[in-house]
Amino acid sequence: MSERTPLILVSNRGPCTFERATDGTLRPRRGGGGLVTALTGLVHHRDALWIASAMSEEDAEVAERHGGGAFTVELDDVSYRIRLVVSDPTAYDRFYNVIANPLLWFIQHYLWDLSNAPEIRRAEVEAYEYGYRVVNEDLAAAVLDEARAFDEAVVMLHDYHLYVAPKVIRRERPDLFLHHFVHIPWTQPDAWRVLPADIREDIYEGVLANDIVAFHTRAYRRNFLLCCHELFGLEVDMEAGVVRAPDGREVWVRAYPLPISAQTFQRTAQRPAVHEYEREILRRRREHLILRVDRADLSKNILRGFTAFDLFLEQHPEFREQVTFIAHLIPSRQDVPEYREYLERIEALVAVVNHRHGTTDWMPIELRLRENLEEAIAAYKHYDLLIVNAIWDGMNLIAKEGPLVNERNGVSLLSENTGAHEELAEFALSVNPFDVQEQADAIHRALTMSAEERAWRAQGLKRIIAARDPGHWVDDQLADIEAKRAGRDPLAARPH
Ligand SMILES: O=P(O)(O)OC[C@H]1O[C@@H](O)[C@H](O)[C@@H](O)[C@@H]1O
């Protein structure tokens, strides 16, 4: 693919949201989450226009000021060319708070089993029709508008918010190359049966309108192929990773595990604000420091993590007053009732554990409910144990960021259901996210591990994490785009 082939990125959340400063001006603030990190790697690598939803009134105001067109934003030394798309607020609310989160997010993290899945009523069907589809059509319209200037372009769509947009784009512009990266797990066929058949079909038709569908791991890639075959009887080649779409086109299905940028992250870890927070941690730390950093999301399995810690303290009372568990939790999606309740349950459980084991001058769990990158990085540097016990997680970048900058040969407790586990299993302590006793035992093992084993594990993790950067991730995808455009055989392209 030529360096000059225009690249259009599309995602619901853009690189920043706008906030009103005290002087009344609108200032960009970097968006959180793995997706923004991943796409920033892409923007670093290639000139690209990034189309995203206006997620707040302030975003909409900025979009309006630019006449709905593209503009440039400078953020943390990166220059982004973005276009914010304003959708009808009611449609957007249905799209984000009824369909994308929770419905699709829950299905794709197995957060329901089929006995406690939600009732689908007219409200959900209408939210799909008049919310999810509408926002997808709005974003697709912006892509078509931007692509009008080009004879050819590659459109890279991202995540579960945009499953329908590709078919809207393809209908108008079959010549554009459509590549869709799904950053969250793809679950097995039965999980998708929660959706009414016509919605399920609409979603798969949408995703299969792409030329390439991409995931972080081979397991999600396999699940997607299985779904195409079992739910829709489509012809799939599991080995080559190819599915024949209903209209006869070949769709490639690929896995590209997302790396972090070691260089950029290490630079961020040297900011003066990080050093300031480190001093505070060093002043207050006990013998052992356990850390977790997560969005307060049900998929992150935060309650079971605290229960495991509770068990550990009960079974190993000699560790009381010796260990502190800092939990940096970023409140997220608070307009969705399940998320609000989850946060309440987290706070209640922390109060119980602290009450049960705490003493007058020791609080076992310290809950930090805020987003503060520098504070979190300071804690990364000084943990003895990092807990990542997600029920399911597309990749989980915390599992990579923490070990990269940690300075104490800290151990990683890592759920076997995270995408990162495919790469890091050898050097982490793998756990089953449901098995709280196993997690309690792993906490004990980590805190009593020999210095040699800790060093061996920590160095192994650092080596794997630093070996690849987002440039490789982007190059692999661009190489496959090139191969497919050139009509090459999928098996002859690089192995997946
Ligand atoms: O709802 P939000 O805050 O935009 O978060 C969405 C993102 O959440 C992140 O946790 C996921 O890794 C991304 O895949 C996803 O796009």
Image (cartoon, rainbow, N blue to C red):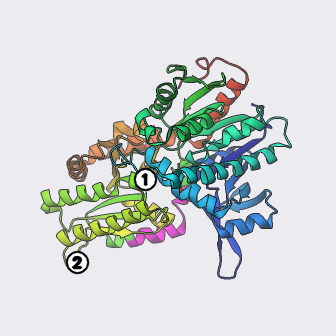
Mark nearer the N terminus (2 vs 1):
2
Using residue 264 as the reference point, say whether residue 326 is left or right of it.
left
Q: Residue at x 37, y 62 (%)?
A: 342
Q: Residues within 10 Å of mark 2 (few under 14, many from 20)?
A: few
Q: Position of residue 403 (x, y in %)?
A: 41, 50
Q: Secondary structure at mark 1?
A: helix
> Residues in magenta?
267-280
Relative to 90, is 144 above or below? Answer: above
Q: Residue at x 41, y 35 (%)?
A: 190
Q: CA distance from mark 2 to mark 1?
A: 28 Å
Q: How many marks?
A: 2
- Quick check: is the Cβ at mark 1 less than 8 Å away from ligand 1? no
Q: Which residue is mark 1?
A: 402
> What secondary structure characterizes most of the magenta part?
helix
- Quick check: is the Cβ at mark 2 less than 8 Å away from ligand 1? no
Picture quadrant where residue 45 is located: top right
| 33 falls in the magenta region | no
Using residue 252 as the reference point, say whether residue 335 is left or right of it.
left
Q: Which residue is mark 2?
A: 361
Q: Residue at x 74, y 36 (%)?
A: 171
